[in-house]
Image (cartoon, rainbow, N blue to C red):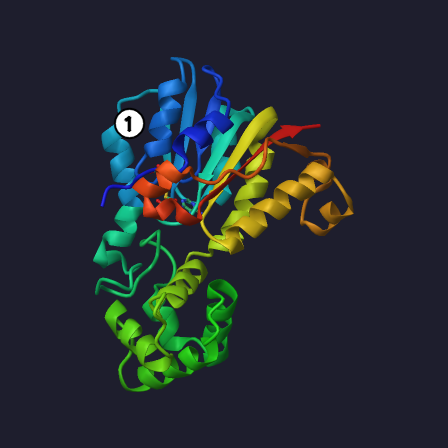
Amino acid sequence: MEHKSVLLTEAIEGLAINTDGIYIDGTFGRGGHSSAILSRLGPNGKLLAIDKDHAAMKIAQEKFGADKRFIFKQGSFAEMHEFAQALFKKPVDGVLLDLGVSSPQLDDPLRGFSFQKDGPLDMRMDQQHGQSAADWLNQAKEEDIAKVLWEYGEERFSRRIAKAITTARASTPFLRTHQLVECIVNAVPRDPHKHPATRSFQAIRIFINRELEDLELGLKAAIESLAIGGRLAVISFHSLEDRIVKQFMNTLAKGDERLRKLPLTDEQLGIRLRLVGKAIKPSSKELAQNVRARSAILRIGEKCR
Ligand SMILES: C[S@@+](CC[C@H](N)C(=O)[O-])C[C@H]1O[C@@H](n2cnc3c(N)ncnc32)[C@H](O)[C@@H]1O
């Protein structure tokens, strides 16, 4: 399936693009948002696009490789400040993060993200680094598996599933997604509303890709990278992500004592964010056209003193 960019117009409007500005798209994906940003930039504007995924890099080269205003870096958006400093040597005017995975990543059985298609149990966004889901599940302690399923999937049968996994792997190590799906389906009661593996797959993906740690680092890097007046737009897809984004933005907006609890330097403590409007959800028209937009939520802030 083609990736349909979520909250495209709303996010681009939220960035209030200045034609000569410098922008960062921290989650290039298939380039839908990047393309819209480039279409609003003049000849002097610049766009740094980042993605962990090697496949995204190939698409970026094919689509925008000839555009002198476009630069792609394969890596985490947590590194955006270093990338931007090295490239531009000055603050940027806007940062966009459209979190999670893209539809082509989910649809490709070779990536192992989907419980609906059999494939290698990988789940890494960056397949060149880190531990695959299979490697982790085959050696992790039962209590650590249960913790991940509970904390990142809010899976109420986390302990039961973790036990089933450690029992199953003792005879046959996990290699394929269908083995994990079968193990989960046999461990928990049927749910008429949700596939029983939904929460576990989400949890393992978040853990394997360090998604929440990267989000916290990425938000801080974005704030460091932005010029005063620069905009940060973040689209999240589940409550764990949105909680982090909301708390980060609200805390910087209030500038209250809770700031001290965030691991910020003294310089960062001087930074404030003005919230731009309320959280935005997709219109009913977008929801009718794109089921993936269902849980999306966009928050926008502007860096100020
Ligand atoms: C929802 S898709 C982005 C879609 C994109 N906005 C578009 O319109 O095509 C999310 C992308 O972010 C990437 N990603 C997720 N976390 C990342 C991180 N910490 N650093 C860099 N890329 C990340 C994923 O590999 C995926 O390609």
For image coordinates 22% across by 46% down, the residue present is 1
Residue 198 in sight from this viewpoint: yes
Q: Position of residue 133 (x, y in %)?
A: 35, 66
Circle 1 residues within 10 Å: few <14, some 14–19, many ≥20: some
Q: Tell me the SS state at disc 1.
A: helix
* Relative horizontal placement of residue 257, taking residue 161 as reference (left or right): right
In which quarter of the view is residue 145 placed?
A: bottom left
Q: Is residue 57 above or below residue 112?
A: above
Q: Position of residue 74 (x, y in %)?
A: 37, 41
For image coordinates 60% across by 45% down, the residue present is 246
In which quarter of the view is residue 43 placed?
A: top left
Q: Position of residue 298 (x, y in %)?
A: 50, 39
Which residue is identified by label 1? 64
For image coordinates 49% across by 17% down, the residue present is 18
* Relative horizontal placement of residue 261, taking residue 230 as reference (left or right): right
Question: What amino acid is at disc 1?
Answer: Phe
Tell which quarter ligand 1 is in.
top left
Q: Position of residue 213 (x, y in %)?
A: 53, 54
- Name the one closer to the observer, 177 or 92: 177
Q: Is residue 127 above or below residue 60?
A: below
